[in-house]
Amino acid sequence: MSKNLVLKNISKSFGSLIAVDNVNLTVAPGEFVCFLGPSGCGKTTLLRIITGFEFQTSGDISYGDKNLNNVIPQKRDFGIVFQSYALFPNMTVSQNIAFGLTMRKMPQNLLNKRVDEMLELMGLTEWKAHYPSQLSGGQQQRVALARAIAIKPNVLLLDEPLSALDAKIRVRLRAVIKRLQHELGITMIYVTHDQEEALSMADRVVVMREGQLRQVGSPWEIYKHPKTSFIAEFVGTSNFYEGHIKDSHVIYGKYSFEVSEIDKVDSEKIYLAIRPEDIEIVGTTIASDECVASNIVEVRTELVTFLGAVVSITVNLEGKEMIVDIAQKEFAKKPVKEKESLYLYFPPDAFHVYSEIFKKLI
C-alpha cells in the first residue's frame, strides 16, 4: 500500500550549530523530490535523518502510520545510493547487486531472477562477471543503483550520486534515474547542489539554506517565481538592481522602469532581478512597437560569448555588468558584435521584486 513519508518539525543540532531547522515536509507515494542547496545548507544531514544514519534532535519522522524516530537504517526498508558508490571490490557486479537480497535470505532461484532483471534494467548484463575496478565510474554508479533497487525499497534515497562523474555521463545517468523512477513508480529523494539536475529530474524541488526550507515547488515554480533573491540567484542566473520607487516606477540611475509587481514592496528601496533570457533585444527578438517606451535602454556590448544553443552578451548598465542571453538561431539572423550599440527591452512582468538582497555565499 502506498504511504506518505512525513517530516514534522525536524531539527538537528551539532553543539551550537543548527544543521536542520524545524523542517516540515510530506513526500507523496511515487514522488521524485530533490533537496537542492549550497554546501552546508543541511540537505545531506536531512537525508541522513531520513535514512536513520543520523537521529534528529527534535521532531518526528514517519512512513505511513509507522513512526521511524528510533528505527535503525536496516529496518526502514529504504534504498540508499551514495556519491562514492560503496561497492564491494572483491565482488562481481552480480554479487554486488545480490548483496541486499542475500542479507534478506531470499531463496536462490528468486535471487538469481531478481539479479538478472536488474542487470537487464540497468544495461549491465554483459558486465555481470566483472569487478568494480574493471568498470567506468558511470557503470559503477549503475551497479550501485541496481543494488539499491533490487531489494524493492519503499523509498530510494540518493546523496549526490552523480557529482563525481563527468558532465556527459551525468546527463545520461540523469535520464536513466528518471526513467527508472517512472517505470518502477518508486518514491525518490535526491540530494544535489546542481540546479540543472534538480530542475530536470524532480517533480518537486526543495530549496534549502541555513538548515531551512526556503521554497518548495515544481521546477517551473522555483525557476519562474523564486520567492527570495537568494533563490533567484542560486537557481539559474539573474541580473540584480537596487533602485527606489517613485511615482509607481522604479528609478535606477537615469532610468525609470515600469515594473508589474512593484506593489509587493512597501518600502521606498527595492531590489529587482531579471533572468538573462527574459531581456529582449529591440529589433531582433522584439519589435519596438511591442515595448513600453520607458523600459527600453541603450547599452554598448562588452563581450559576446557563444555557448552552443545560447549566445551570452555582456553589457554595462549604469556601471553594473549585466548578462543578456538569446537563442543562437536569433543571433544568427542578426549577429551582435563587441563594442556595438544595442537597445534592450526589460518587460515589466519579467522583473522579480524583493525587499531584501541576499548575501553572496563564499
Image: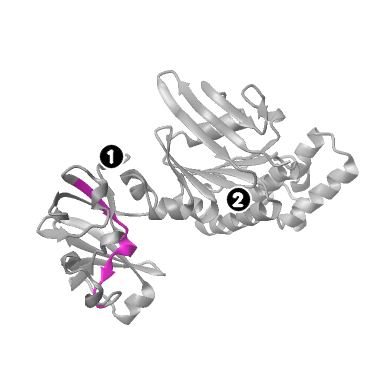
Q: How is the image coloured?
A: one colour
For this rendering, which residue is in front, 2 or 176? Answer: 2
* Secondary structure under the numbered disc 2 in the rendered image: helix
Dots 2, 1 in contact, CB < 8 A: no
User: Is 91 a magenta residue?
Assistant: no
Kind of residue sitting beneath label 1 = Lys
As drawn, the residue found furthest toward the left would be 254
In primary-sequence order, the first of circles 2 and 1 is: 2
Q: Is residue 137 above or below residue 81?
A: below
Q: Residues within 10 Å of mark 1 (few under 14, many from 20)?
A: few
Q: Which residues are magenta?
A: 270-283
- Expressed as whole percent of the image width and height from the top left, the position of residue 46 reads 52, 32
Q: Residue at x 48, y 25 (%)?
A: 11
Q: Is residue 68 above or below residue 169?
A: above
Q: Is residue 40 above or below residue 264?
A: above
Kind of residue sitting beneath label 2 = Gly
As drawn, the residue found furthest toward the top would be 15
Residue receiving disc 2: 137
Q: Residue at x 89, y 39 (%)?
A: 107
Image mark for residue 173: none
Q: Is residue 178 visible?
A: yes
Residue receiving disc 1: 359
